[in-house]
Amino acid sequence: MKPRYIITLAISLFFIGNALAQTDSAEIKKEKRIVIIKKTHENDSIQRDTIEINLDNDDFDIELDDQKKSVYQPQGIINEGAFNFGFAGLMRGTNPTNTLGNDELPELSNGKSLHIGLEQSWGFNLIAHKVRFWTGIRYDILNYRFSNSNVRLTADQPDFTYALDSLNNSSKSKLVVNYIGVPLAIGYNSDANNADEGFWIRAGVHAGYRVRAHSKVKTESGNKDKLFDDFNTNNFAVSPFVYLGYNSVGIYARMTTTPFFTENQGAAANAFQFGIVFM
């Protein structure tokens, strides 16, 4: 055998011997036991020392609770989206200061007057991540369907004006008003981690600004006539509201405290909506 191979073999045996002389430790965790196996290799003999540590139930549960808290720690600010779908209506009132005689309001088909609302909100923790202050941005579409399909609204008038057109056969006549605004509310959630889990309730007020309004008439032949105007509706709508639900489905109710029409430019009326909300 060549000398360099002998030297290489000797060095290899030296390092292997040192490695076998070192102490190896392995830790095994199973259920509520920790087993430590200690192995020592010396002089071609093997010695093994086993140490078993039993954890009390309380210590084990505390460890799991700490892990759970670190993973499921509630957030200070959470966000959610909401979709409202329900019915819209107008509640007639009285305005003794109105001397213009423009208190007439076409009768609505309440079962066909609809409300659609889209909302993106952020909840800020107040108490224990269950009581939160909510705000965001909201868009509402109020679709008022007239019972009489012959109703024709008139634009560019000093007050709300309409006429009845029985000559043209029509199947639908309605007024559509859109608002964009900001909701402010205080809410409670039984689940601190999710706004749409468990029982929840929210109450507040929504301030909206009218961004669009138009009338729409559909004839029996299928033609659709749209007329864009504000029709003397109020520029602003302040609506207290309440949500009540469980998991991701609930109910809502809203009613404006501001008049639907500009003062002395239409009937004294307040708008209301109610229906289902999906979180």
Image (spheres, rainbow, N blue to C red):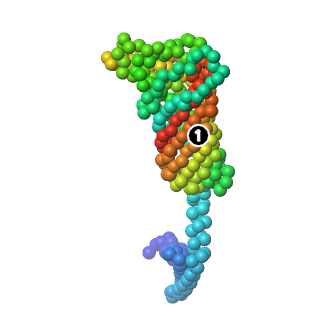
Task: Return the residue at label 1.
Answer: 241
| Residue 78 x, y percent position in the rendering | 59, 47
Residue at x 60%, y 35% (from the top left corner): 239
SS for callout 1: strand
From this view, report whether residue 240 is shown above or below residue 200.
above
| Residue 43 x, y percent position in the rendering | 54, 87
Q: Which is more toward the observer, 216 or 14?
A: 216
- Taking 234 as reference, is 146 left or right? left
Circle 1: residue type: Phe
Residue at x 49%, y 48% (from the top left corner): 248
From this view, report whether residue 249 is shown above or below residue 158.
below
Q: Name the residue furthest left.
A: 221
Residue 257: image quadrant is top right
Is residue 191 shown to the viewer in this render? yes
Q: Which is more toward the observer, 277 or 162?
A: 162
From this view, report whether residue 109 is shown above or below residue 122.
above
Is residue 36 shown to the viewer in this render? no
How many numbered marks have been drawn onto this rendered protein structure? Answer: 1
Instruction: Specify few, some or many for label 1: CA neighbours under 10 Å numbering under 14, 14-19, or 20 or more.
Output: many
